Image: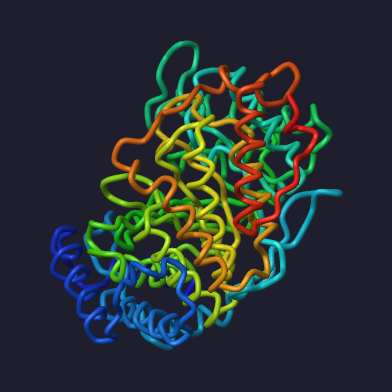
């Protein structure tokens, strides 16, 4: 089986190629060739298709794409080639069950299949969204940890230290990453969720050196947390990412890879983007030795994945992976709209439902394109998880009808979405519950979802 040292040898000795030529001449052209060869066509009338043959063709196209183009090492300017037998062996030997967390919070993530009644693994939180202060960070982490469906937490990103903006790979990033770990664990301790894992390896730890600093036992990052490493689109890695993989492997920690193929980017339209996402799952298993994947394909214009094209992309790539492998895959959803807006809740519901019905687990949620400070609350991931649990076992054809009904509520607003309100405006940190305005909105939202066939009950938190 391919190991990191094998990847290094390939990265040092593989065919030399400029990054631009790899992206445009090698990758982009081959993706479109696969789209034509397998006659894969986007169906705008069915954002969640039920065509098993389409899913299987998508899987074969993705496997062939990886074999044909390989991965790319930005540090050496060389292609990392893989044979078909290496790819298939990697898929066979990838773990189909991984434990995360400690004590009563320790639990196994298992693979799912399309229309699977098994509840999705719920990686809940800010999806790396930026926060403006330590107070905001603690408020969010406490709220995320208290969500009943939370299996693991995706932490926010601390953006400043002592009034200075964090700079990549600088002492400021190291200090911020250490603080990310300490404050995150403190927040979980405060609400009695000491064993909850942080599966995004701390959002502040962008560089390899900051990750290495954060794993010191003084700061609270544990081998039972998930060590997530980002891959660059399309299928690119570098020495910094491989360094992270070596550090995580040395601790015996599970490695995850997040990646964001852009619809409208090198993969082209929804067909090519779905194929590229399938291929990147396999690439992560081989290059970074991943135990789980976190795909979040995004629309180049909207920087979200709730549009009709994006739902189809998530559905087809999810069904391709879940039908043909036991790889652990967690779909991360991004909304265009911000907190305390109906649009935001409908967007995340559509994306989550698409993923769960297609055999994936879920990460929620990147709110308002995930670029504004303090533009996420504990409400959005909680409601996303409630939807994810409610639709587990739903037929794809039924989920397709609900998705089309939801699209009608927000699709026309994607180009100019409402930013919504800040964390401080719509979340009561002292009472740890939504504002009266947000509670009223939640009540209306749950009533609408129930009328569409997704049963959501009002909880104590939904009351003003």
Instruction: Give the percent coordinates (x, y) of residue 373.
Output: 45, 25
Q: Residue furthest top?
A: 163
In the image shown, does 180 or 28 lie closer to the viewer?
Answer: 28
Between residue 173 and residue 24, name the one nearer to us: 24
Which residue is painted at 22% across and 61% down in the image?
266
Residue displayed at 47% across by 62% down: 288
Residue at the front extreme, as displayed: 451
276 vs 437: above or below: below
Q: Residue 190 or 182: which is nearer the viewer?
A: 190
Residue 462 % position (x, y): 72, 33
**Viewed as shown, does residue 316 lie left or right of 458?**
left
**Looking at the picture, does residue 393 appear above or below residue 19?**
below
Q: In terms of depth relative to the viewer, which is nearer, 400 or 14?
A: 400
Q: Establish if 247 lies above or below 17.
A: above
By what rule are the colours in the image chosen? Answer: rainbow
Q: Position of residue 447 (x, y in %)?
A: 65, 44
Q: How many marks?
A: 0
> In the rendering, at what x and y percent does residue 227 appear?
57, 51
Is 184 situated left or right of 55 in this image? right
Compared across the picture, whether 147 is left or right of 177 comes to: right
Q: Quadrant of residue 177?
A: top right
Quadrant of the image containing the C terminus:
top right
Instruction: Say left or right for 366 vs 378.
Output: left
- In terms of image quadrants, where is residue 121? bottom right
* Residue shown at the point (40%, 28%) measured from the top left: 170
- The residue lying at 28 percent from left, 70 percent from top is 272
């Amino acid at each position: 089986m391919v190991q990191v040292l094998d990847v290094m040898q390939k990265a040092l000795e593989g065919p030399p190629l400029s990054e631009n030529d790899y992206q445009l001449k090698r990758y982009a052209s081959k993706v479109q060739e696969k789209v034509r060869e397998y006659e894969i066509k986007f169906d705008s009338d069915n954002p969640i298709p039920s065509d098993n043959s389409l899913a299987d063709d998508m899987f074969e196209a993705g496997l062939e794409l990886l074999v044909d183009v390989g991965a790319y090492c930005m540090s050496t300017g060389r292609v990392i080639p893989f044979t078909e037998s290496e790819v298939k062996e990697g898929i066979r030997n990838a773990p189909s069950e991984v434990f995360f967390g400690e004590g009563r919070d320790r639990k196994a993530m298992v693979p799912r299949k399309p229309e699977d009644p098994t509840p999705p693994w719920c990686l809940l939180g800010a999806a790396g969204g930026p926060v403006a202060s330590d107070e905001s960070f603690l408020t969010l982490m406490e709220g995320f940890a208290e969500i009943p469906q939370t299996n693991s937490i995706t932490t926010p990103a601390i953006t400043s230290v002592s009034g200075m903006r964090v700079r990549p790979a600088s002492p400021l990033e190291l200090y911020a990453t250490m603080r990310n770990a300490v404050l995150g664990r403190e927040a979980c301790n405060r609400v009695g969720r000491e064993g909850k894992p942080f599966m995004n390896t701390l959002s502040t730890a962008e560089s390899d050196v900051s990750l290495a600093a954060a794993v010191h036992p003084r700061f609270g990052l544990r081998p039972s947390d998930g060590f997530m490493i980002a891959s660059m689109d399309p299928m690119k890695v570098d020495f910094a990412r491989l360094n992270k993989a070596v550090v995580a492997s040395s601790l015996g920690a599970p490695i995850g890879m997040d990646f964001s193929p852009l619809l409208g980017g090198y993969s082209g339209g929804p067909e090519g983007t779905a194929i590229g996402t399938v291929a990147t799952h396999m690439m992560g298993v081989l290059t970074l030795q991943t135990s789980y994947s976190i795909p979040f394909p995004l629309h180049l214009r909207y920087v979200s994945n709730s549009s009709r094209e994006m739902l189809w992309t998530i559905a087809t790539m999810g069904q391709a992976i879940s039908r043909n492998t036991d790889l652990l895959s967690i779909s991360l959803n991004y909304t265009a709209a911000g907190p305390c807006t109906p649009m935001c809740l409908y967007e995340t519901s559509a994306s989550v439902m698409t993923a769960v019905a297609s055999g994936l687990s879920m990460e929620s949620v990147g709110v308002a394109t995930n670029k504004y400070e303090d533009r996420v609350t504990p409400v959005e991931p909680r409601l996303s998880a409630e939807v994810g649990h409610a639709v587990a076992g739903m037929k794809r054809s039924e989920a397709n009808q609900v998705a089309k009904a939801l699209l009608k509520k927000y699709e026309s607003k994607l180009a100019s979405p409402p930013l919504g309100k800040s964390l401080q405006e719509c979340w009561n940190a002292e009472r740890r519950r939504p504002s009266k305005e947000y509670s009223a909105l939640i009540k209306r939202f749950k009533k609408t979802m129930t009328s569409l066939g997704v049963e959501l009950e009002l909880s104590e938190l939904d009351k003003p």
